[in-house]
Image (spheres, helix red, strand yellow):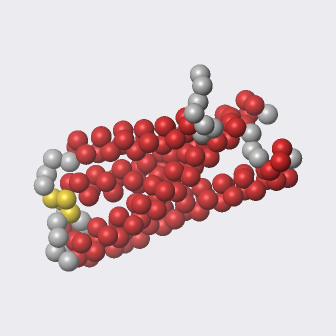
Amino acid sequence: MSHPYSGFSGSLASVGIGFLIWFNRRREKTAEAYNLGPGGNPKEYEPILARYIRLAEFVIGLATGSIVLIVGSSALHGQGGHLPWFYASPLILIASSVVYGIGFMALQLVTMEEVLHGNPHTAFTYSLNETLGYSCLACFLLGYLWLVIAVTNFN
């Protein structure tokens, strides 16, 4: 099968993961608005928000560190500083986890601000927050799994 560019499969997988999670999470949200925080008190959501942000920071740190290490090591392996083509898709998935994670953190903070200002926590925002968070984790895990399989099958 011919691909338009190296990493095309990883790009499709990244978008597909986001779409599938969005479709699933959005379908389950039937109420017009949701409580943000235990008992509907948004100020009690702050400790939960801190844990979510910390987890996203951790995944983003692992992902970016991995990308830098893998790409940086290509300079030491010859091939003109280029990685073999089979690294592209897993690296795109890992990079997508960074994008999803940053979007998740930003939307979590915006959502918290909106709710503190009296605006409702809508089904759309709730499902988008979940989509970004779960997509971050899924792309990270699938990217690493794909990377292990690619490296062990081609080297």
Query: Is residue 146 rendered to the left or right of residue 110?
Result: right
Quadrant of the rendered structure where residue 9 is?
top right
The quarter of the rendered structure image containing the C terminus is top right
Quadrant of the rendered image containing residue 50: bottom left
Residue 155 in the figure: left or right of residue 94? right
Kindly identify the residue that appears in the image at 74 percent across and 39 percent down: 84
> Can the viewer see residue 9?
yes
Q: Position of residue 64 (x, y in %)?
A: 61, 59
Residue 125 versus residue 59: which sits nearer the camera?
125
Q: Is residue 142 above or below residue 102?
A: above
**Could you say which is closer to the camera, residue 85 or residue 144?**
85
Q: Residue furthest left?
A: 32
Outermost top residue: 1
Vertical arrangement, residue 143 with respect to residue 109, above or below: above
Image location (x, y in percent) of residue 87? 68, 41
Q: Is residue 150 above or below residue 76?
A: above
Q: Nearer the viewer, residue 45 or 61?
A: 61
Q: Identify the image quadrant of residue 15.
A: top left
How many dots with numbers?
A: 0
Identify the residue at image location x=20%, y=48%. Answer: 29
Residue 145 visible in the displayed image:
no
Q: Residue at x 48, y 43 (%)?
A: 14
Residue pictured at 83% horizontal, 44% vertical: 79
